[in-house]
Image (cartoon, rainbow, N blue to C red):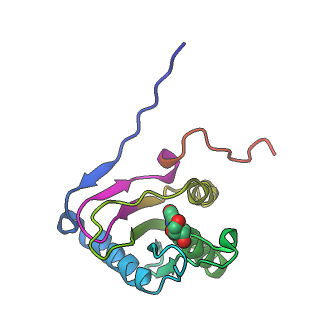
């Protein structure tokens, strides 16, 4: 039997179409991107997280001469958020990325970051909205991170 998965997401053609709350978070992610340490790839990524207490926390990619020792912006931000606000609920994350300052292609999160996002989404039992975009133009928005990683390994059998 062949089964098919459907994934629903929203697409916005410009940042101007976003709600004020989402636009603000995207702009915070763009600001965080500026401080990325992307010495080896020059590919800068910024992430911003909105907690249910209204706080916005940010992170960016941190590279290393020993390449695998670096970390993506998404995980830098979410580990920081959870480490400092372990009881807060994460409402949403926005990611802005690109090598060029005028990149208009949305940059989709890597598999390892999806896995980490899902860990906290399932822990808090509330969806984490996830938006990603380039430096301008199209924005993709998922209403929950589980849609980003079907057939996830969720540890339920550990
Ligand atoms: N990177 C992120 O920060 N997030 C992603 O989702 C994809 C990739 C970073 C890791 C590395 O510093 C650079 O982008 C190139 O892969």
Instruction: Say if residue 104 shows up in the picture.
Output: yes
Which residue is at the far top?
Answer: 1
Pick whichever, 40 or 31, lies toward us: 40
Which residue is at the far bottom?
Answer: 35
Residue 125 position by quadrant: bottom right
Q: Which residue is drawn at the image coordinates 35% and 47% (left, top)? A: 9
Q: Which residue is drawn at the image coordinates 69% and 73% (left, top)? A: 69
Residue 141 position by quadrant: bottom left
Tell me: residue 72, above or below residue 105.
below
Instruction: Say if residue 89 shows up in the picture.
Output: no
Q: Which residue is drawn at the image coordinates 40% and 68% (left, top)? A: 94
Pick whichever, 136 or 125, lies toward us: 136
Per the image, is 19 magenta?
Answer: no
Q: Position of residue 88 (x, y in %)?
A: 57, 73
Relative side of 15 to 133, left or right: left
Q: Quadrant of the N terminus?
A: top right
Q: Position of residue 91 (x, y in %)?
A: 46, 66
Relative side of 52 to 119, left or right: left
Q: Position of residue 123 (x, y in %)?
A: 64, 58
Residue 19 position by quadrant: bottom left
Instruction: Give the total of numbered labels.
Output: 0
Pick whichever, 48 or 51, lies toward us: 48
Give the extent of the magenta segment: 131-147
Q: Which residue is drawn at the image coordinates 46% and 31% (left, top)? A: 5
């Amino acid at each position: 039997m062949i089964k098919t998965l459907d994934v629903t997401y929203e697409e916005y053609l410009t940042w101007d179409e976003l709600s004020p709350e989402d636009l603000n978070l995207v702009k915070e992610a763009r600001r965080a991107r500026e401080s990325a340490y992307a010495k080896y790839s020059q590919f800068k990524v910024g992430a911003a997280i909105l907690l249910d207490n209204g706080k916005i926390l940010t992170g960016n990619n941190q590279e290393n001469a020993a390449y695998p020792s670096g970390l993506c912006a998404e995980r830098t931000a979410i580990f920081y958020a959870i480490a400092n606000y372990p009881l807060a609920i994460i409402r949403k994350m926005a990611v802005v990325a690109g090598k060029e300052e005028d990149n208009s292609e949305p940059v989709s999160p890597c598999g390892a970051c999806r896995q980490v996002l899902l860990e906290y989404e399932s822990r808090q039992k509330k969806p984490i909205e996830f938006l990603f975009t380039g430096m301008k133009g199209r924005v993709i928005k998922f209403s929950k991170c589980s849609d980003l990683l079907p057939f996830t390994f969720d540890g339920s059998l550990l």
